Image (cartoon, coloured by chain):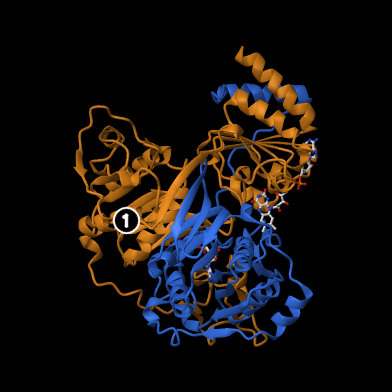
Amino acid sequence: MNIVVCIKQVPDSAEVRINPETNTLIRDGVPTIINPYDMHAIEAGLQIKEMTKGRVTVITMGPPQAELALREAMSMGADDAVLLSDRAFAGADTWATAFTISRAIAKIGADIIICGKQAIDGDTAQVGPEMAEFLDIPHIAYIRKIEDVKPDSIKVQRMMDEGYDIVESSLPVLLTVVKELNQPRLPSLKGKMAAKKAEIKKFTAKELEIDEKDTGLKGSPTQVKNIFAPEARSERKILAGNIEEQINQLAEELKQLKCL
Amino acid sequence: MPIIVDRDKCTGCETCVSVCPFDAIKIKDDGKAFINEYCQMCMACLSACPEGAIIEIKEEGAPVSYQTSDYKGVWVFAEQREGSIAAVSLELLGAGRKLADELKAELSAVLFGASEKDANELIKWGADKVYHSDSPVFEKFNDEPYSRLLVTLIKEHKPAIVLAGATPIGRSFIPRVAASLRTGLTADCTSLGIDTDTGNLLQVRPAFGGNIMATILCPNHRPQIATVRPRVMKKSEYRSEKKGEIIPVKGENLICRTKVTDTVKETFESRVNLQEADIIIAGGRGLGDAKGFNLLFELAEILEGSVAASRAAVDEGWIRYSHQVGQTGKTVCPKIYIACGISGAVQHLVGMQSSDIIIAINKNPEAPIFNVATYGIVGDLFEVVPLLIKKLKEIKS
Ligand SMILES: Cc1cc2nc3c(=O)[nH]c(=O)nc-3n(C[C@H](O)[C@H](O)[C@H](O)COP(=O)(O)OP(=O)(O)OC[C@H]3O[C@@H](n4cnc5c(N)ncnc54)[C@H](O)[C@@H]3O)c2cc1C
Ligand SMILES: Nc1ncnc2c1ncn2[C@@H]1O[C@H](COP(=O)(O)O)[C@@H](O)[C@H]1O
């Protein structure tokens, strides 16, 4: 079984601070991490590998330093790593990102592709399903449990608003996973050593035979027009008095708001 | 890169450094500004530079083989779950109606599954036309048939704008539609408008966990597709006399390689559908243990609300992950969000700070949750919540 896990390097948002005066993100010295959902995708890949005696390839599209994320995944147990890096890839929106990565996946081949539910910098949750469309394979999003993997099919639980669905799919398939799925393992010492020396395959636009008009900023249908700070919360009502008085006021307000 | 610094003009004044929301500009040793890879092309620095030294190099966007003006009208994908129309679909009809009126164009709804009666309801909620398929393929949600038929309809009828709910269903299959049509998709929008000069759709969405808002355009590709958060748009008025056209659509021979074999409702945790809840009572580590949530369920019962949690409470195993709100959980915007024993870490705030009213109960007056709260009560939740329950019960009876 060939398993491909797509991972993205993102700024560690636990460390991102906001400058309250200018309302900007302070990125200085903020470490980068593997997108937290993608850690669960890696773990899922490794578990399927162990069940099926498969191979896990991790893949990322990003600047050269994204190699670090790949090595971290390898120290957890991924067998191969692929870095898609090219100036032409810069500024990609989800269409161009998904198109580029899917080209690489088509080249290396995969039975199961696993993505995180979304990346915590962009929060779009679009790259996974878009890749499935480009690869012309089915996908299942928001997976919280993998029930069964067979040589040509898979059975999973998909999270929905009111509960979950049990969904079966033929292979190859693309899955996007939520945090509830598993607990990512820690890298082993042996894994760390191996990851340091491991060779990482690198692909550029030319090697993927992608026209520059289909990748990066040029290939992106969407554009950021501008950005601005969110509106500050308007009204703020201070409740006065002792706890009981405050609660009486609050209960009154809730009544006014027709909550009762 | 499309944004460059004209090194002859740059004086190293650092104005751009301070306006850049992404911390992507640095003054290098040579005293000139340098834009690094954090740049998100937001263009904030262009107008800020007093020397006009930062310029955008216009590059051709992705090529298109059609006239964007051939695409007309606004479409709303009306989501149904087990035959009933999701509330977000009606909200989208409200938003879509406004956009369509502004563009002097038609508003159509697309309904896969459900009945003709439901299709008719969509007309009363604002649609001029409804493309309806009652094919049994659509009873359960599978991405492939949904996306295939929507792609076919879009290719045939060429709408300029397509809106869908940012729900598990919309966010799962709409990306396939956008990929297939080679057009843009903006996720999770919180406001929509029309650019009066170009007629393009202005799509506003939170980025970086809600700390920054971005306006996204899809100028050269059609349709312009957006998923929209539940509960942020307003329904238009229900007009029982309104007439419209229902256009039946076949849903045959659609490829489907997934199969839903069972649907499990988690009713035991009463109303987990946080994204559509009017009132949410959320608990954090301050609850102390799983039993602490019983108090919140009691309050939820009285207010007819849903119960949510911070990640700390979920990680402790006090409540299921499906209740988690925040960056790695759900994003909610109820009318009222009551946070009990939650400190208000930024990862939690991004999931709930757009709620209309936020009530915070925390014993630490310095807790950051109070910075976003409409009403704050500094106190022990085990004292405050029972008193509140008592008071509300009194009012009710
Ligand atoms: C990548 C990443 C993603 C994350 N995603 C999320 C996410 O999606 N959602 C999320 O919530 N968090 C998320 N977090 C975690 C987040 O940073 C915080 O750790 C978490 O939100 C804290 O939860 P809490 O407020 O319940 O706990 P604490 O921070 O421990 O706060 C408990 C609060 O309860 C108060 N308290 C204690 N006892 C009482 C009492 N008797 N009465 C009243 N008040 C009391 C205390 O004063 C304190 O303010 C994420 C973190 C990372 C790194
Ligand atoms: N640049 C990238 N390289 C590799 N995988 C990515 C990249 N961007 C997104 N992904 C994958 O797609 C998922 C969803 O990302 P997004 O659509 O950006 O929210 C992530 O969790 C990753 O698994």
Relative side of B131 to A151, left or right: left
Query: Could one spot residue B273 in this view of the protein?
Result: yes
Relative side of A209 to A110, left or right: left
Which percent across, then down, holds residue B285?
A: 76, 43
Which percent across, then down, holds residue B397?
A: 61, 11
Position of residue B167 relative to residue B116, above or below, is below
Question: Which residue was labeled with disc 1?
Answer: B196
Q: Quadrant of residue B284?
A: top right
Chain coloured orange:
B
Which percent across, then down, holds residue A40?
A: 63, 61
Residue type marked 1: Thr
Position of residue B42 relative to residue B142, above or below, is below
- The picture's colour for chain A is blue
Identity of the residue drawn at 51% across and 42% down: A161
Which percent across, then down, holds residue A33?
A: 67, 68
Identity of the residue drawn at 53% across and 33% down: B278
Q: Quadrant of residue B118?
A: top left
Q: Say what secondary structure mark 1 lies in.
A: loop
Disc 1: host chain: B
Identity of the residue drawn at 60% across and 32% down: B268
Position of residue A201 relative to residue A29, above or below, is below
Q: How many marks?
A: 1
Query: Could one spot residue A229 in this view of the protein?
Result: no
**Front residue (pair B45, A5):** A5
